[in-house]
Image (spheres, rainbow, N blue to C red):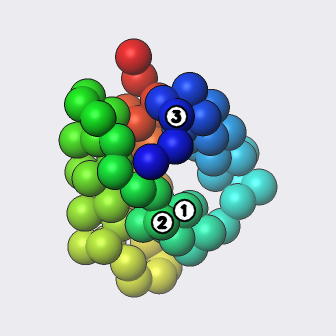
Amino acid sequence: MKSINDLVASAKTVCDRYRAGRMERETVREWVLGLGAYPPPHGERVREAAEWFRLHNREPVSEDIVLADIDRLKAISAP
């Protein structure tokens, strides 16, 4: 388990890069799936994001899926 501060900073960076088109969805997916365990409330958000990316792993994806991806990434870094 890494620190919450590192998780929040990384999630913000990944979200910003993904939203700007500077990071491929598969890279984001692999990052989320590679996250470890975290305490609440971040741990639940990480698990939810991981489950989302497991279920929605086919390319290409619609704009609605991308927006939902971004929402999950933003949730990880929320206070």
Q: Are marks 3 and 2 in contact (CB under 8 Å)?
A: no
Residue 51, quarter of picture:
bottom left
Residue 50 left/right relative to 35: left
* Marking on residue 31: 1
* Marking on residue 3: 3
Q: Find the distance from the CA under tag 3 to the CA under tag 2.
A: 15 Å
**Is the residue 46 above or below the residue 4 in the image?**
below
Q: Residue furthest bottom?
A: 58
Residue 54, quarter of picture:
bottom left
Q: Amino acid at mark 3?
A: Ser
Which of the two residues, 29 or 8, is positioned nearer the viewer here?
8
Among numbered discs 3 and 1, the one appearing first in the sequence: 3
Residue at horizontal 48 percent and vertical 79 percent from the top: 60
Q: Are marks 1 and 2 in contact (CB under 8 Å)?
A: yes
Question: Where in the figure is residue 64, as x and y percent of width and height?
Answer: 37, 54
- Residue occupied by mark 2: 34
